[in-house]
Amino acid sequence: MPEKRDSPPAAEETVAKRQRVDCDDSVMEDVLSPATMDDATGSCPCEVKYPSTQHFNARCGIQRSIALAAAHIGFESTSPQVMESFTGLIEAYLESIIEETKRLAIASRREHPIPSDFENMLKRYNLPISSLLPHLRNPMSIDPTPNFVQTHDGHKSSEFKPLPLLGSELSGQADKDAKPYIPSSFPDFPSKHTYKFTPQEDTRSRDSKKIREEAALNAQQGEDALRRLVRASKMRKQKEAKTLVERDNQGKERFRLWESTMKRFMGGNSKDVATGQVEIADHSMIVNGDVAFSRKDVSRTVQRSATVPGKGP
């Protein structure tokens, strides 16, 4: 019986499996673990991307504080395992403090903790307030803020400087030059009307005589406008009446006689009367626009009789 041939060796997996990453707090431990850093360094360090989350930023801040404290004591470097251990201890300590403070606030029916809740939390962990006094002063020396030297290139500044859009009257360059405390590196001021009130000359007249003249002129103009309005309405009514009476011959004759009689009573020139150029609406009523001459309502005084009508005493 022939022997069976051995099966060919299984092909090695060429594609490495991707490490499973959860969306909890273990993300930072997987990303910052030494094994992950070694794999990233061996393959391609340019492809390593750290998640920019709130937990990541807080964890980096804690590790930076640990590194500064270790450098202040005298340590030059730390291993990743020691850094992770210190970070875990600090996170657990802060988490217990925050949870206890929040529990005391919720027990008092408050949404946010107050200083008394923090004080009660310290008493629960047997931490006196006097133990916090040494930590108010930072033992590490703070380096002064570096002074940056400003370099000005005259050729480039004159070449790329835009042309002024406003004249010297509206430009804010004079205000900027008058304030020496403003750094020269600051941009130019905008026009003055953007941050200052523009004074305007009051052209109104203060003379009482001119004011009375203007009031009289306005009253006269209003009176003329009312007169023209009444004249137009009267002319329209006359045209409508003339149209109605001219439908029959008798009415047309009566209207002609009435019109000729009214023209003679108004006393126009004989030439105008003959040609019919006199307009009755020109002699309309006089309209006065003053308030003193406006129409007033007459108060009606009704005397009620003491006895009811229809009934005897």
Image (cartoon, rainbow, N blue to C red):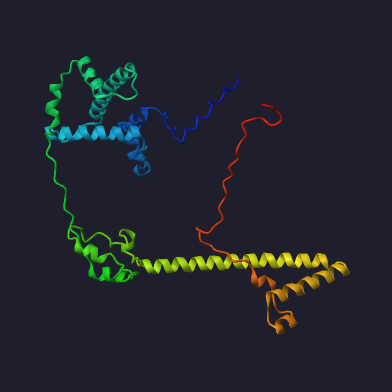
Front residue of 31 and 99? 99
User: Farthest residue toward the right?
Assistant: 249
Regarding residue 32, the answer to whether it shows in the image is yes
Image coordinates for residue 147, horizontal then vertical, percent = 16, 53
User: What is the quadrant of the N terminus in the image?
Assistant: top right
Residue located 68% across and 79% down the image = 268
Q: Quadrant of the C terminus?
A: top right
Percent from the top left, x then y, of residue 12?
A: 47, 33
Question: Is residue 99 or residue 32 the one in the foreground?
Answer: 99
Residue shown at 69%/65% (left/top)? 234
Residue farthest to the bottom, as pictured: 271
Task: Report the front residue among 247 and 29.
Answer: 247
Q: Can see residue 204? A: no
Relative to 118, is 74 above or below? below
What residue do we see at 15% from left, 25% from top?
A: 132
Q: Residue 272: which quarter of the image?
A: bottom right
Image side of residue 59 versus residue 305, left or right: left
Quarter holding residue 294: bottom right
Q: Is residue 188 above or below residue 114?
A: below
Q: Which quarter of the picture shows residue 242?
A: bottom right
- Compared across the picture, whether 243 is left or right of 166 comes to right
Is 196 situated above or below 107?
A: below
Is 246 left or right of 42, judged from the image as shown?
A: right
Percent from the top left, x then y, of residue 120?
23, 17
